[in-house]
């Protein structure tokens, strides 16, 4: 590890470098120097992100654009150069490392402690949309092709159902029927995009609360982090995935479905913050379809959980048998309550 650290242009001498955060994809470390100066060191997971160079190009383009909009160093991520002047380090064995400035005085929450916390995350993601509204999204590479292509997720689901390699379909008939009944609605947003009615935006694609840094004194949003999945997409997808996770009253893998509800209080808090952050950057049809984004992202994620259950839990990490099936069930409960809350479109 020391040979990696020494190749970056640090301020001061390294004192410690220890694992940091709750992420499961990249290797993340908190690096402390004697200045004192803090950094976040990360090794990019090339199995998940095979085009790591394209990913880094996206991050550089986005962070440079954000800094032009707002030069405050606490309001966007800043990469530390290598001693040779590079923006990141690619080692002789193909590993890719990057070093970020640590955002001082920041707070990262895994779950909202109050509805206001979720509202502040909404403001952060909305502000991200507003700042990137004039950036040509097609300049970014698609680091995870088809990531929020819901019809494609359904095709993968049907393939898994046909293969049924572990014979698990017999124990998930109710869940399978639930998701298949809603397949005809899966392409609603994509059809609007393909028809030119929804614009392609720069989207974050992992809009969880813990990807926003809040000021630890004021609880106001500082910046959006974890930009690995930034790529072209729909504003409704970013909004929807945040609601799917943040407006649920229970954990994603909760077994007791009586505890799982779609909270209108949490939803409205996030929505208010998101719209405030977006300003006037969204079109009328984008505003109209934000609830569809919440419903369809919840449906899509449930399909992905159920697909992974059928295939033997090969993508999402599990710690117990049936965990992905439990995850699919929580998304079912949330989908039904969203359908009721949003008065699902007639004929959908």
Image (tube, rainbow, N blue to C red):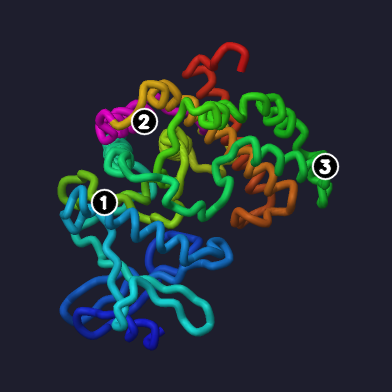
Image height of 260 relative to 211, above or below: above
- Mark 1, Cα crowd under 10 Å, few <14 / some 14-19 / many 20+, is many
Give the mark, 1 or 3, whose residue is nearer the N terminus. 1
Q: Is residue 268 magenta?
A: yes
Tag on residue 182? none
Residue nearest the viewer, comparing 263 with 139: 139
Q: Residue at x 37, y 87 (%)?
A: 2
- Please give the name of the residue rendered at 75% of the width and 37% of the height, measured from the top-left corner: 172
Image spot of residue 206 (x, y percent) = 44, 47
User: Residue 27 occupies which quadrant of the picture?
Assistant: bottom left
Give me the C-alpha separation between circle 1 and circle 3: 46 Å
Q: Which residues are magenta?
A: 260-280
- Find residue 66 and name its label: 1
Q: Earlier in the sequence, mark 3 or mark 2?
A: 3
Quadrant of the rendering where the C terminus is positioned:
top right
Can residue 236 be seen here? yes
Return the residue at label 3. 162
Q: Secondary structure at mark 3?
A: helix
| SS for callout 1 | helix
Chief secondary structure of the magenta portion: helix
Residue at image coords 34%, 78%: 17
Q: CA distance from mark 2 to mark 1?
A: 28 Å
Q: Are marks 2 and 1 in contact (CB under 8 Å)?
A: no
Dividing the image into 4 quarters, which one contains the N terminus? bottom left
Label 2, on which residue?
Answer: 266
């Amino acid at each position: 590890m020391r040979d990696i650290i020494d190749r970056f242009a640090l301020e001061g001498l390294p004192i410690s470098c220890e694992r940091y955060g709750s992420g499961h994809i990249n290797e993340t470390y908190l690096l402390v120097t004697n200045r004192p100066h803090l950094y976040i060191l990360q090794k990019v997971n090339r199995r998940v992100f095979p085009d790591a160079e394209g990913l880094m190009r996206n991050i550089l383009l986005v962070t440079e654009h954000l800094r032009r909009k707002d030069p405050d160093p606490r309001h966007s991520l800043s990469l530390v150069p290598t001693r040779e002047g590079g923006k990141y380090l690619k080692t002789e064995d193909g590993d890719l490392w990057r070093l970020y400035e640590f955002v001082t005085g920041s707070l990262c929450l895994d779950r909202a402690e109050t509805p206001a916390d979720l509202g502040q995350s909404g403001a952060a993601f909305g502000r991200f949309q507003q700042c990137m509204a004039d950036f040509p999204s097609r300049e970014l590479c698609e680091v995870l092709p088809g990531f929020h292509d819901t019809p494609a997720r359904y095709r993968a689901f049907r393939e898994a159902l046909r293969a049924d390699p572990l014979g698990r379909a017999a124990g998930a008939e109710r869940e399978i029927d639930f998701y298949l009944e809603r397949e005809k609605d899966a392409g609603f947003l994509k059809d609007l995009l393909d028809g030119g009615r929804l614009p392609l935006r720069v989207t974050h694609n992992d809009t969880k609360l813990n990807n926003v840094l809040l000021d630890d004194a004021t609880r106001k949003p500082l910046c959006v982090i974890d930009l690995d999945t930034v790529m072209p997409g729909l504003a409704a997808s970013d909004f929807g995935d945040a609601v799917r996770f943040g407006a649920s009253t229970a954990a994603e893998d909760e077994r007791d479905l009586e505890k799982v509800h779609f909270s209108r209080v949490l939803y409205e808090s996030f929505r208010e913050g998101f719209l405030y952050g977006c300003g006037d950057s969204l079109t009328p049809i984008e505003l109209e379809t934000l609830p569809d984004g919440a419903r369809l992202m919840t449906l899509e994620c449930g399909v992905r959980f159920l697909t992974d259950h059928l295939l033997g839990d090969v993508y999402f990490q599990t710690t117990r048998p049936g965990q992905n099936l439990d995850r699919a069930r929580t998304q079912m409960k949330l989908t039904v309550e969203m359908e009721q809350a949003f008065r699902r479109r007639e004929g959908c």
